[in-house]
Amino acid sequence: MVVLNAIGAGQSRAVLPWCARVFFDYTNISYTYKDHAAVDSEIEGNCQDDVRWTVAYAVGLSDEGAVPVKTFGLKETGFSFHITRESLARWMVDVAAGESKGDFDNRRVIVSN
C-alpha cells in the first residue's frame, strides 16, 4: 500500500521551516493537516507487519512532466519544494509494484524533484 500525504503532516513536520509551520497551524489549511496527520497515524498501527506500506510526503505539485525523484528521510533536509505530478505518480506505482526492491517498505519518505 502506498499512501500519498503532504509534507508537514505527521512526522515530516519537523523538517519544515518555522514559517511553514506557522502557516499550517494558523490558517484554514490547519483543518486539512489535522486530517493528514490522522491518516498518517492510522497506517502503521493498522498495517503492522501484515501489509507492506509506504507513506510518501509530497512537496508542492507541478505539471512539468516526468523528472527524476529524490527521496529523503524524515530528519533530512535538502529537498526542493516541488515535485511534478507525473514523477510522483510514476514513483508511487513503482514502489507499489515492488520496483524499489523494498527500499521504502514500512517507511515514511519525503519525495521531491
Image (spheres, helix red, strand yellow):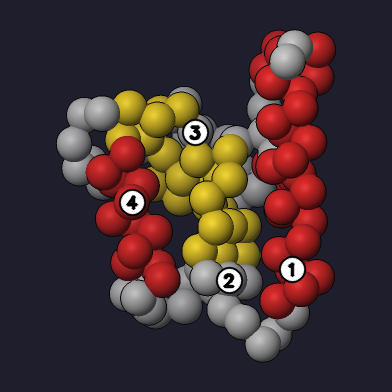
Element at label 2:
loop
Q: Report helix, strand or loop for mark 1.
A: helix
Q: Are marks 1 and 2 in contact (CB under 8 Å)?
A: yes
Q: Which residue is mark 4?
A: 89
The first of marks 2 and 4 along the sequence is 2
| Residue picked out by circle 2 | 53
- The residue where tag 1 is placed is 44
Residue at left offset 29%, top offset 45%: 87
Q: How many marks?
A: 4
- Amino acid carrying mark 2 in the image: Trp
Q: Is residue 74 left or right of residue 2?
A: right
Callout 3 amino acid:
Val
Q: At x 74% / y 40%, what residue is drawn?
A: 35
Q: Name the amino acid, label 4.
A: Ala
Q: Earlier in the sequence, mark 1 or mark 2?
A: 1
Viewer-closest of 57 and 15:
57
Q: In terms of image quadrants, where is residue 83?
A: top left
